């Protein structure tokens, strides 16, 4: 459904969106919340690539080196992963794409793929946030090894952090969250992914959400865009 009739298909409450934002914009967390609320899959190329790495395939090993250096995995590889994923039945009515498309090429490829499937996007939603906040969010982020909960040593409350460690969990620092990799990833975002924002702006399908502040506030703002 296009802008003139409201962003989403109200009769079903389903949506096909691309969630965009720099590393640290919170888009992974927000996508998970939105997935639970709308009952549509969150499709994260980052998660799928990390799963391939964990599975230890040869391709996974190559991908790991690229991911750890903060660079992007080749367009044709992520497109292959996404094409396979989008044709599974659970994505037929709705999905939240998280971390894809990340280059102008991927955006064009996605458009073509969705045209072929007859399931065009409803919107591309940009989570917009200041550079300084991004740095703190990224260098401070940890995942609880027990629950998978995303935490941050700067922004999470002491109780939340303790809840993980006192239950015997560890606060795990993602391997691609080092200072150097983060700087790289932010640079890559500016040069490779910002053109994707323009791509959707030109098509009239871009929505911008202020992603500064606590995750719950940001989530309410995101939901306003998804009614
Ligand atoms: P971020 O925290 O930067 O949003 P993600 O979990 O989305 O991280 O992705 C982690 C890494 O996986 C990226 O830095 C990149 O190397 C790779 N990656 C994820 N999605 C893509 C994509 N669409 N195209 C190319 N590389 C990708």
Image: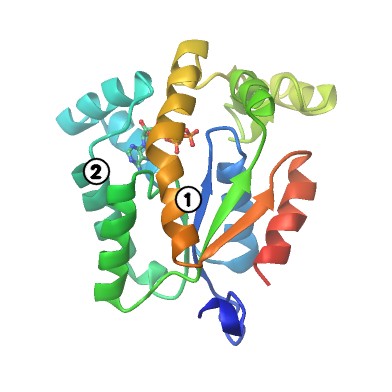
Q: Going by the image, does 103 lie left or right of 137?
A: left
Q: Is residue 160 visible?
A: yes
Horizontal arrangement in the rendering, residue 81 relative to residue 158 (left or right): left
* Callout 1: CB less than 8 Å from ligand 1: no
Q: Say if mark 1 contacts mark 2, CB within 8 Å.
A: no
Image position of 106 with respect to 112: above or below: above
Q: Quadrant of ligand 1?
A: top left
Q: Quadrant of the C terminus?
A: bottom right
Closest to the camera, between mark 1 and mark 2, is 1
Name the disc covering residue 132, or none. Answer: none
Image position, residue 106 (x, y; %)? 30, 50
**Dot placed on the residue nearer the N-terminal end, 1 or 2:** 2
Q: Residue at x 67, y 32 (%)?
A: 130
Q: Which residue is mark 2?
A: 75
Furthest residue to the left?
58
Residue 55 image point, x, y percent: 28, 33
Q: Is residue 87 visible?
A: no
């Amino acid at each position: 459904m296009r802008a003139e009739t409201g962003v989403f298909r109200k009769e079903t409450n389903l949506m096909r969106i691309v969630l965009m934002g720099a590393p640290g914009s919170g888009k992974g967390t927000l996508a998970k919340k939105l997935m639970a609320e709308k009952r549509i899959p969150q499709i994260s190329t980052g998660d799928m690539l990390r799963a391939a790495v964990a599975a230890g395939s040869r391709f996974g090993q190559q991908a790991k080196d690229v991911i750890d250096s903060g660079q992007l995995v080749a367009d044709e590889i992520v497109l292959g992963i996404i094409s396979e994923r989008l044709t599974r039945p659970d994505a037929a009515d709705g999905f939240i794409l998280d971390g894809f498309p990340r280059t102008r090429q991927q955006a064009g490829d996605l458009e073509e793929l969705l045209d072929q499937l007859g399931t065009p996007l409803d919107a591309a939603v940009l989570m917009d946030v200041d550079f300084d906040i991004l740095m703190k969010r990224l260098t401070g982020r940890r995942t609880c090894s027990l629950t998978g909960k995303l935490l941050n040593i700067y922004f999470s409350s002491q109780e939340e952090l303790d809840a993980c460690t006192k239950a015997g969990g560890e606060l795990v620092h993602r391997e691609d969250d080092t200072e150097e990799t983060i700087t790289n990833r932010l640079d890559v975002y500016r040069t490779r992914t910002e053109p994707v924002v323009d791509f959707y702006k030109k098509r009239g399908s871009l929505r911008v959400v202020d992603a500064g502040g606590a995750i719950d506030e940001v989530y309410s703002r995101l939901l306003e865009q998804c009614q």
